[in-house]
Amino acid sequence: MARIFVVDNGGQWTHREWRVLKYLDVDTEIVPNTTPWEKLADLDGLMLSGGAPRVGLEHTLGACGDYLKNAPYPILGICAGEQLMATHYGGKVAPGKVPEFGKTELILDDVKGGTILAGLPEKSIVWESHNDEVVTVPPRFNLVAHSLNCPVQTIEHESLPRYGLQFHPEVEHTQFGERIFRNFIDACRK
């Protein structure tokens, strides 16, 4: 059984991320974002939850930078978690030209969906809740998907197991949310 913890960055749907992992038979816990890295060193994976408004622009949140720097295992950043990941690795976050709330159409840029979106169709419906977004993809990250109003919906590092999603796969309105979670769990088991 994989051990994947969820780092609570104050997101409104952190418990849903935990619940989906539990449903998929993962050993999981929600931990504060101030948890020392050493207490998370023996996991199989980590999720950085979304966060309070504008957290992506603050560029720091608890010990998330330590996790990104030290973890040899996969990390999935969701919403503000993706924004924190992007800034940590040299990307840029700014207010979105059109903040997105509710459903939007996700469009794959990588037709195979990379690792995290593998098996998804070219277009699908996802659920959004953000004011800020990644506007410059970090070096060595690939753009995997976009939407009409958000040019950077999904990113993946070219060699490290790092994945970022601007949208929320944990909510039932995201069409292939469970598949995305399973893709991440599979990456954590390798």
Image (cartoon, grey):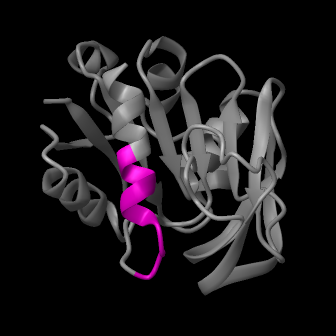
Q: Who is closer to the viewer here, 76 or 33?
A: 76
Q: Quadrant of residue 184?
A: top left
Name the quarter where the N terminus is drawn: top left
* Identity of the residue drawn at 33% across and 18% down: 37
Residue 88 position (above or below residue 60): above
Predominant secondary structure, magenta span:
helix
Q: Who is closer to the viewer here, 35 or 155?
A: 155
Q: Who is closer to the viewer here, 16 or 57?
A: 16
Q: How many marks?
A: 0
Q: Who is closer to the viewer here, 156 or 108?
A: 108
| Residue 84 position in % (x across, y down) | 61, 42
| Residue 41 position in % (x across, y down) | 28, 14
List the single residue furthest toward the bottom. 102
Residue 158 position (above or below residue 25): above
Q: Is residue 12 magenta?
A: no
Magenta part of the chain: 173-182
| Residue 80 position in % (x across, y down) | 56, 55
* Identity of the residue drawn at 21% across and 18% down: 39
Q: Quadrant of residue 99?
A: bottom right
* Identity of the residue drawn at 80% across and 23% down: 140
Name the quarter where the C terminus is drawn: top left
Q: Quadrant of residue 85?
A: top right
| Residue 97 position in % (x across, y down) | 87, 75
190 relative position to 5: left or right: right
